[in-house]
Image (spheres, rainbow, N blue to C red):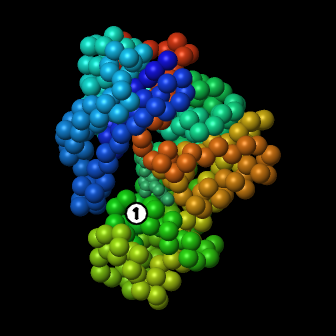
């Protein structure tokens, strides 16, 4: 079965084809440099860019794989969550293609697609505990099969990636700054007393990262010498001079530790509560983070279960994950009608 995947939920436009669980080809265009000029994603610009770029990416992918629309069994599209205008571009394109080619239309939950993505690299084992940590979401799921997800916990305010990006902004790093915090965090030991691990003294599996953000804001206000000048491009971060670099690295390492250890505590709690799991799957942009990957390795080892982490290019938004999730849904017999809606937020 051959499935095209379309991803336009935020600021990457991406397409890919998966055949029987294997990736045949993919194309991706990121808008990150455009939005970086504004310090965050501008929804209207994102939609217009998807509209401009998506047909070209599709045409190139088809040329590269030697396929045409008639060779597709299904057209899978991320239907949400995400920015409404952006989602509508992908969903409308998918509907048009399905209508013209006769391929099935398959709406995919973007978050499930993130968690299933590592299935492209190796076998997924179920039941699995899934931790989805991205720019917009922090969710813990029980995953019984590729099509059965039960939400166990979620963030009550900021997502983990948002906490990274907002902290990075306060430290003057370019947007999105999560990876710069990760990079500098490697150069120092964390001070575990510097920032609180937020919302851990409660029995829930939910998260709240806004308190941590406030703690960083207070720290930065007390240490204005940390954030003078601007760092508009990644080279400025690479060229940071010694003393200031060391001070920033300590802040980054301490912040990164607070996030990673908070995730560790809640994932451990979930694993204790949910009974025997075959694996722990960690996905989404923040799954690229060195500290998070390390902390999850510790948890998986302690519980004697497999750890499934996607390779770095599968962590951030991409078309392959949508095509793969679409393939899983299609082979389980799911498809949508042309009344498929984009669902920007909430449960889908
Ligand atoms: O999953 P994703 O590509 O997009 C959403 O669906 O949100 O995640 C993007 C998020 C951003 O907040 C970005 O800063 C963060 O993932 N991110 C990282 C790292 N790489 C990407 N955060 C921390 N450390 C990283 N290495
Ligand atoms: Zn995503």
| Total residue callouts | 1
| Mark 1 burial class by Cα count in 10 Å: few <14, some 14-19, many 20+ | many
- Residue 109 in sight: no
**Viewer-proximal residue, 23 or 146?**
23
Q: Position of residue 198 (x, y in %)?
A: 57, 59
Q: Is residue 45 left or right of residue 129?
A: left
Q: Position of residue 81 (x, y in %)?
A: 40, 35
Q: Residue at x 32, y 48 (%)?
A: 30
- Residue 232 in sight: yes
Does the closest atom of ligand 1 sit within 8 Å of the Cβ of label 1?
yes
**Viewer-proximal residue, 81 or 282?**
282
Q: Is residue 156 left or right of residue 301?
A: left
Q: Residue at x 60, y 57 (%)?
A: 292
Q: Residue at x 31, y 45 (%)?
A: 29
Rendered view: 137 above or below 290: above
Which residue is denoted by mark 1 in the rendering?
Answer: 177
Q: Is residue 18 left or right of residue 338?
A: right
Q: Position of residue 127 (x, y in %)?
A: 70, 31
Rendered view: 110 above or below 265: above
**Viewer-proximal residue, 43 or 66?**
66
């Amino acid at each position: 079965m051959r499935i095209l995947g379309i991803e336009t939920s935020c600021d990457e436009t991406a397409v890919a084809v998966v055949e029987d669980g294997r990736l045949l080809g993919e194309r991706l265009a990121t808008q990150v440099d455009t939005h970086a000029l504004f310090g965050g994603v501008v929804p209207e610009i994102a939609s217009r860019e998807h509209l401009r770029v998506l047909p070209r990416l599709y045409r190139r992918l088809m040329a590269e794989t030697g396929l045409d629309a008639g060779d597709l069994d299904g057209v899978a599209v991320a239907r949400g969550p995400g920015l409404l205008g952006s989602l509508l571009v992908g969903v409308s394109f998918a509907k048009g293609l399905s209508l013209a080619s006769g391929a099935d239309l398959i709406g995919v939950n973007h978050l499930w697609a993130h968690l299933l993505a590592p299935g492209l690299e190796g076998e997924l084992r179920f039941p699995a505990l899934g931790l989805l940590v991205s720019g917009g979401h922090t969710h813990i799921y029980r995953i019984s099969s590729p099509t059965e997800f039960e939400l166990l916990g979620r963030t009550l305010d900021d997502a983990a990636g948002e906490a990274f990006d907002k902290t990075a902004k306060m430290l003057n790093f370019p947007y999105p700054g999560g990876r710069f915090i990760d990079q500098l965090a490697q150069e120092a030991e964390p001070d575990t007393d510097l920032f609180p691990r937020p919302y851990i003294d409660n029995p829930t599996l939910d998260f709240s990262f806004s308190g941590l953000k406030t703690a960083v804001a207070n720290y930065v206000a007390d240490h204005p010498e940390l954030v003078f000048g601007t760092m508009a491009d990644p080279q400025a971060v690479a060229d940071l001079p010694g003393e200031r670099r060391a001070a920033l690295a300590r802040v980054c390492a301490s912040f990164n530790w607070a996030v990673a250890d908070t995730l560790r505590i809640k994932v451990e709690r979930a694993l204790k509560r949910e009974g025997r799991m075959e694996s722990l799957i960690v996905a989404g942009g923040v799954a690229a983070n060195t500290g998070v990957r390390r902390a999850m390795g510790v948890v998986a080892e302690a519980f004697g279960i497999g750890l499934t982490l996607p390779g770095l290019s599968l962590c951030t938004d991409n078309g392959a994950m949508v095509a793969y999730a679409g393939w899983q849904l299609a082979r389980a017999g799911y498809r949508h009608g042309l009344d498929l809606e984009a669902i920007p937020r909430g449960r889908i």
